[in-house]
Amino acid sequence: MTADGRPASGAVSRAAAQPRRDWLVGGGGRRVVMTAVAGLLLTVPVLAHDSLNGRLVLGWLAVAAGTALGVWALDRRTRPGRRVALLGGAVCVALAVSGLAVLGTTLASPYAGDLLCRDDVAAATFGGAAELRAGQDPYASYATLAVERAHGCAHLSVTIRRNGRFAGAPGLPSQAAQDAAVAAAVANPGAPEVEQRLDYPAGSVLLGLVGSRAFPWLMALLLAGAVAVTVRRATSDRRVVAVALAAQLALVSLVPDGHTDAAVVALLLLAWGSPAGLLGGLALGLACGTKQTAWFFVPALLGTAFARGGFGSLARVGMGTVAGFALLNLPFVVLGPGAWLHGVLAPATDGLFPLGAGPIGLITSGVLPIGAVPLFWGLQLGLVALSAVLSVRLDGRWPGIGVLVASLALFVGTRSLLEYIAGAGVLLVCVVATAPPAADEVPEPRPVRGRAVVAGA
């Protein structure tokens, strides 16, 4: 202080140089928060599945609202108001705390009984792994009902196919008809009405090698690691990003179910955190080599790579994707190429009944005839193609727009199961949080070890 009570010039310069410490100091941080809210709306069908109780239209309206909010939040020109962002931030903080509590409770209270018996997807994960440990090629030897019966499962869980006696069925048969088909398939494993082969890429089997007890912990650790890497790569305030990611409660539903969707989402987080690099392509390839749902994001990520780095980045990401996929699947291709190809393509070729929380409910509820299924195939493929086009043309202004469109493609498909869309919110947050600053955009400050630094400096 000077003699007349004014601050010394050095103090003024230091105060002016000290950035304002505010979780929502820049437009990027606020956009991350609003993207997190959009992600929550996109995953309402997962979060409120029991509450909706068959009222699918309410879930569709939430997804539509999340899509509109997501498009707005992805736009670099968007500057959310401080009060709106603070309200969204408060919601995210509350849900992040709740999510961590639910995750802890979930891990502390494992599935009662053998996780393999939870459903036919879990049976494929752990049953296929058991056959691999025994020295067999699971694509040639796996049979769902045989595995479930060998493990003493009280309920035989299968996926019903629109073949055989159900070839002309107008919708999913009654439970009594399904039970009769299962009984017939037990006596005749070749019965066409029941899906019995291993129909996932090899990554699902390899993850199952950890066993059913360790599996939920592995899924939680993979998600936690991917979230930590995303926060580390963030170009926005890391505290905001961490809270926004943790607020995506739908992720918790992926941990205990014996499915590999949590691992796929974790790998997609790593891929979208570095969409123009070789490692991003490798992560995408590993995700595609684990479950087919990751395939829907390939065109969008390749388009993003081209938009950000031209043909060089496109080639690196493409090579990484091929390498990651081959790393997991090539040994099984060598063992039996026909069996592997038939299994991996089975979801598209085996005539599965439409099912899910998306607009396909118009068919499952009888509003539209089952003959309208090709319309949904066309809509899904159209959105996948659109995700690539928009990624190439609009990534500069709407970075990561392809993630939103590819997520919608999974939602409108003929098999829009809840686990397929549970990762939409966290992926949307990731693409906003890790997007490179625009050429005319000043990176916002972020605190590191008690002092403010500029992101990317």
Image (cartoon, grey):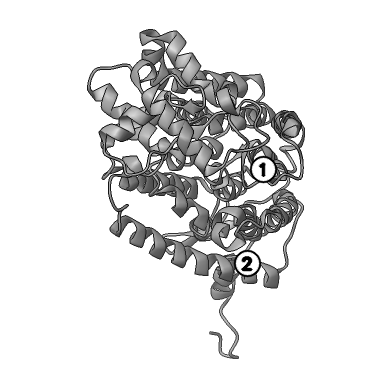
Of 135 and 374, nearer the camera is 374
Which residue, given by chain and number where applicable, does mark 2 sit on? Answer: 88
Apparent side of residue 237 relative to residue 329 in the rendered image (left or right): right
Measured in 3D between alpha carbons, the distance from the residue under mark 1 to the one under mark 2, in whole angstroms, is 35 Å
Q: Position of residue 328 (x, y in %)?
A: 39, 22
Which residue, given by chain and number where applicable, does mark 1 sit on? Answer: 364
Q: Is residue 41 above or below residue 366?
A: below
Q: Position of residue 282 (x, y in %)?
A: 47, 26
Q: Closer to the N terminus: mark 1 or mark 2?
A: 2
Of 200 and 278, nearer the camera is 200
Residue at 52% x, 37% y is 177
User: Judging from the image, what secondary structure is the residue with disc 1 in?
Assistant: helix
| Farthest residue, direction left | 134
Apparent side of residue 304 relative to residue 266 in the rendered image (left or right): right
Q: Is residue 331 above or below residue 376?
A: above
Circle 2 crowding by C-alpha within 10 Å: few under 14, some 14–19, many from 20: many
Q: Position of residue 187 (x, y in %)?
A: 37, 24
Q: Amino acid at mark 2?
A: Gly
Q: Amino acid at mark 1?
A: Thr
Numbered label attached to residue 158: none
Of 141 and 226, nearer the camera is 141
